[in-house]
Image: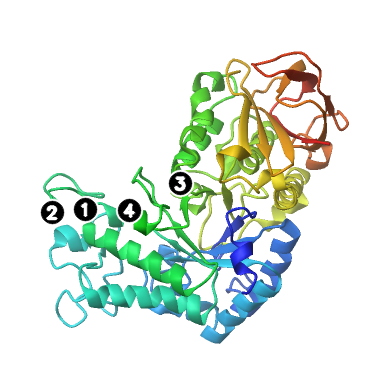
Amino acid sequence: MQKRPSINATDRPINIYEVHLGSWRKKEDGSYLSYKEAVRELVQYLTKMHYTHIELMPIMEHPFKGSWGYQITGYFAPTARYGTPQEFMEFVDTMHSAGIGVILDWVPSHFVTDGHGLVAFDGTALYEYEDPRKGYHPEWKSAIFDYGKGEVRSFLLSSAHYWLDRYHVDGIRVDAVASMLYLDYARKEGEWVPNIHGGNENLEAIAFLQELNKSCYRDFEGIMMVAEESTAFPGVTAPVDKGGLGFGYKWNMGWMHDTLKYFKTDPLFRKYHHNQITFSMWYNYDENFILPLSHDEVVHMKGSLIGKMPGDVNQKFANLRTLLSYMIAHPDKKLLFMGGEFGQWKEWDYKDQLEWYLLDYPLHKGLQKMVATLNRLYKEEPALHKLEMEREGFEWLNEKDWEREVLVFAREGKKERIVVVCNFADTIYPDYRIPLAEDGIYKEIFNSQAKEFEGWDESQKRILEAQEIPCCAHPYSASIDLPALGVLFFKKR
């Protein structure tokens, strides 16, 4: 807890493993692991995989398992499915003892309409807006809090503070912020009520979110407040006194959508979609971002991560290794949903545990080993995290080779420099010239197509020795054989 302000700082590596506690693992008889049983296995796994944080999908009490915890009744109660409140306290404490931060999903955007919940609590619309055009959510068939009432704001603020205070959690990820910000969210014309200025912003919800972030950051040093916000609403992570919402981080949904769309495209045609993989850097420093490959991308017939990849089995794994390597190389904090790290084939199903048996197969085991290696490099290499929230931490070396589907860029720390080469084409490029902004020798420290990860690149560790041959407006360059569907990291000596 004392180290938290430095551990959660923007210049430190933050790499989050997103978990649904009821389906990560189960007992042999199909029953849930308790908080105490789950944390023993999770700590070992997170440590082995070099994750810095765990994010739990809502563990607040909820009546319907199929809501995954997002339809809450008990805003002050850890679900009894996995044990007692004291056992959840022990869960957090055990994570902290292992140096792992704990983030909780929290849902102030809507609540269940079950009769034993908050809806019509005293026979009137006590917690929700009375007008169904503001108080009923058509997409989730749930009730919406009336953020204009002081007692409702107090209830929600007390809930957020409760988890930070009594359970010592390190952060709160606020679900569905966009649905709170816009009065016309998921509504057709005539189904919503404009604000006093005639606009579609929910001014009361905006004021509540600002109050939430100000009070939480004021009272709990070093925590993280994270917004799942899917629009271009300005200033989500800007300070409240400068007109922002005051969050510490925002999920970068644009990066996620563009990147997955690009990787689902057959490599034969990716050159026509090059902008999808480069566009994120145009707005990357507008907010403090987390790159999410979350549970939402592997449900509702969207397919698993490995299932989205084109090609035969070997090509699918090469593509997924490339995607996850590019994600670590890209500036911003990271989040990956459980199962993606070893290539689970089927969509996530909250009723079943992950397909752990797949780790008996080399391609899955190799992918998991690669993710652990990437996570370790992200933690250990200052160039990959020290300045990832600063423009000075990133430099394009060649972003214009759309025809060969190659990206080259540099990541920088205070003194360190790593050159990243991404080949998104299923084509080997002999004697590919890598532009370099600085003289020197660069040693390969990572190759997503290495044999140890079940890749097919036979080359040994490559060396880039800068030559005074200008390339792509840079004074130096070096030539290498570039493996197909691969990402390489080169560290300057």
Residue linked to disc 1: 183
Q: CA distance from mark 2 to mark 3?
A: 29 Å
State left or right for residue 447 relative to residue 262. Answer: right
Q: Name the residue at 55% across, 77% down.
A: 168
Helix, strand or loop at mark 1: loop
Q: Tell me: residue 477, above or below residue 15.
A: above
Residue linked to disc 4: 243
Q: Amino acid at mark 1?
A: Leu
Q: Name the residue at 60% across, 45% down.
A: 388
* Disc marking residue 287: 3
Front label number (3 vs 4): 4
* Residue 349 % position (x, y): 51, 57
Q: Which quadrant: the C terminus? A: top right
Question: Are the residues tagged 4 and 2 within 8 Å (C-beta)?
Answer: no
Q: Name the residue at 31% across, 68% down.
A: 111
Q: Amino acid at mark 3?
A: Glu
* Disc marking residue 193: 2
Residue 70 quadrant: bottom left
Question: Are the residues tagged 3 and 1 within 8 Å (C-beta)?
Answer: no
* Residue 378 % position (x, y): 70, 48
Identify the mark nearer the N-term, 3 or 4. Answer: 4
- Dot 2 surroundings within 10 Å: few (below 14), some, or many (20 or more)? some
Q: CA distance from mark 3 to mark 1?
A: 23 Å
